[in-house]
Image (cartoon, rainbow, N blue to C red):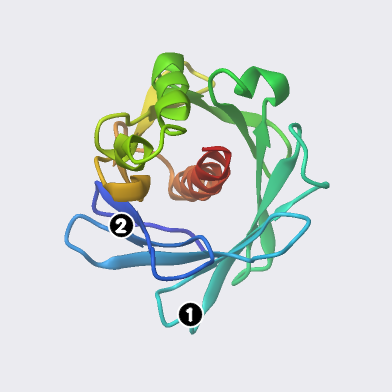
Amino acid sequence: MVLNNLNYPLDFKFKITTLASDFNITDKNGNYVAYVRQKMFKLKEDVIVFNDESKSKELFRIKANQWIDFNASYSLNDLIENKNFGRLARKGMRSLWKASYDILDAHDQPKFKIQEDSAWVRFWDGFVGEIPIIGMFTGYFLNPSYTVTGVDGKAYFKLKKMPSFFGRRFQLDRLIDIDDEEESLVILSLLMMILLERARG
């Protein structure tokens, strides 16, 4: 299946009442798009995307292709149609300074790149975040943003961390119309990237 007829911007909002990294994805009207749960205590990343918070229907699954590592990639799988959408690949050591990921299709062909817009925001977020008490409030004034570009060089999506306590809210805007299947590929990649980037601090 594909995620289609989406009303942007989409909100990604983490729950702070669970130990797991769970978050809702809703559209601009507050309608559910998906509910994301990262399985806990796994040596490999394992994420399930449900239809909503009731978790009555599994839509997608994202799994790490190797043990936790800087160069791990993550397969993006459609559970309804039992097919692979593609994968998200982190760009190893280059991601230490500024987050950078490749999005590849089911044939392992590069389709998009996710690039963090400012390395300095990451630096100060990490630095100030370690200061007792003050670090709790970095989510209100240090908010990274990410741009998704195609192989054609055009910017297709912009993801921003929104001001919020504990940095628990992100917003995704689509800048250019895109094929439904490629749109689903990008959204699945971004939700996995958010989990990875939040875990890194």
Q: Is residue 136 visible?
A: yes
Which quadrant holds residue 175? top left
Q: Residue at label 1?
A: 55
Q: Secondary structure at mark 2?
A: loop
Q: Residue at x 39, y 70 (%)?
A: 17
Residue 161 in view here: no
Q: Name the side, left or right, on which 170 lies relative to 46.
A: left
Identified by mark 2, the residue type is Asn
Furthest toward the left, the residue is: 29
Total marks shown come to 2
Residue appearing at x 29%, y 48% in the figure: 165
Provide residue 153's location: percent of width, then percent of height: 46, 16
Residue type at mark 1 is: Lys
Do residues under tags 1 and 2 come within 8 Å of each other at their CB atoms? Answer: no
Q: Position of residue 117 (x, y in %)?
A: 40, 19
Q: Where is mark 2, residue-wise?
A: 5
Q: Residue at x 49, y 49 (%)?
A: 191
Secondary element under disc 1, as helix, strand or loop, is: loop
**Pointer 1 or 2: first along the chain:** 2
- Mark 2 neighbour density, 10 Å: few (under 14) some (14–19) many (20 or more): few
Q: Quadrant of residue 42?
A: bottom right
Callout 1: 10 Å neighbours few (<14), some, many (20+)?
some
Q: Which of 182/145 is in front? A: 145
Nearer to the camera, 148 or 109: 148
Q: Please tell me whether residue 201 is drawn above or below residue 169 in the rendered image.
A: above
Reply above or below: 109 against 120: below
Q: Image height check: is 60 above or below 129? A: below
Is residue 152 or residue 44 the one in the foreground?
44
Instruction: State the CA–CA distance, disc 1 to disc 2.
Output: 21 Å
Pick the front one: 6 or 33:
33
